[in-house]
Image: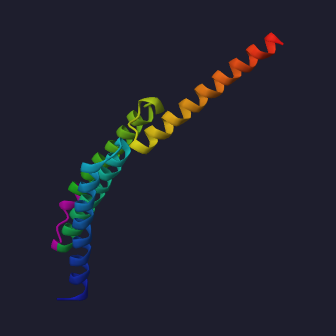
Amino acid sequence: MSLLQGAYILAGMAMVATIGLSLVRLALGPSVYDRANASDVIAVAVIGLSAMLGAVNGRSDVQIITVILTLIGFLYAVTIGRFTGRMSASRSIMTEDEAKAEKAKMEREAHSQMYAEERAQLREEE
């Protein structure tokens, strides 16, 4: 086995490991952005694998498939970016910690507004 073949095997194993870890991120989430990022990483790894297999086997027809996969991956990333960019912050999915922080913030705002109203009533009575 030559050094170049060893490099191909190592690169292939790294891309397969990347795909596996990205599948875990795709399944676990927790947000749409995590899943979109994971699917984009999977697309890039598949593109890298197809380009590497074309180079190893000396087949130039695989380059066409690689270019098509690249275009599909680009269009997917742009589409996800456009549609998720329009989501408002109030409609996004929050983690449990973010939900607790948002609830505490709303309670602080409600208390400060209530105290401001009470102070205004006391000033009117004076």
Residue nearest the viewer, comparing 78 with 108: 108
Counting the numbered discs, the total is: 0
Which residue lies most toward the right here? 126
| Among the 4 quarters of the image, the one containing residue 52 | bottom left
**Residue at point 59%, 32% (across, down):** 108
78 relative to 67, above or below: above
Residue nearest the viewer, comparing 100 with 71: 100
Residue 40 lies, in percent from the top left, at 32, 51
Residues rendered magenta in the picture: 57-64
Residue 44 lies, in percent from the top left, at 30, 57
Left/right placement of residue 51 relative to residue 105 reads: left
Which residue lies most toward the top here? 125
Residue nearest the viewer, comparing 40 with 70: 40
The quarter of the rendered structure image containing the N terminus is: bottom left
Left/right placement of residue 25 relative to residue 95 reads: left
**Residue at point 21%, 62% (across, down):** 50
Q: Is residue 51 magenta?
A: no
Q: Is residue 62 magenta?
A: yes
Left/right placement of residue 80 relative to residue 125 reads: left
Residue 8 lies, in percent from the top left, at 23, 77
**Residue at point 20%, 64% (across, down):** 60
The quarter of the rendered structure image containing the C terminus is: top right
**Residue at point 40%, 39% (across, down):** 94
Left/right placement of residue 38 relative to residue 101 reads: left
Residue 80 lies, in percent from the top left, at 36, 39
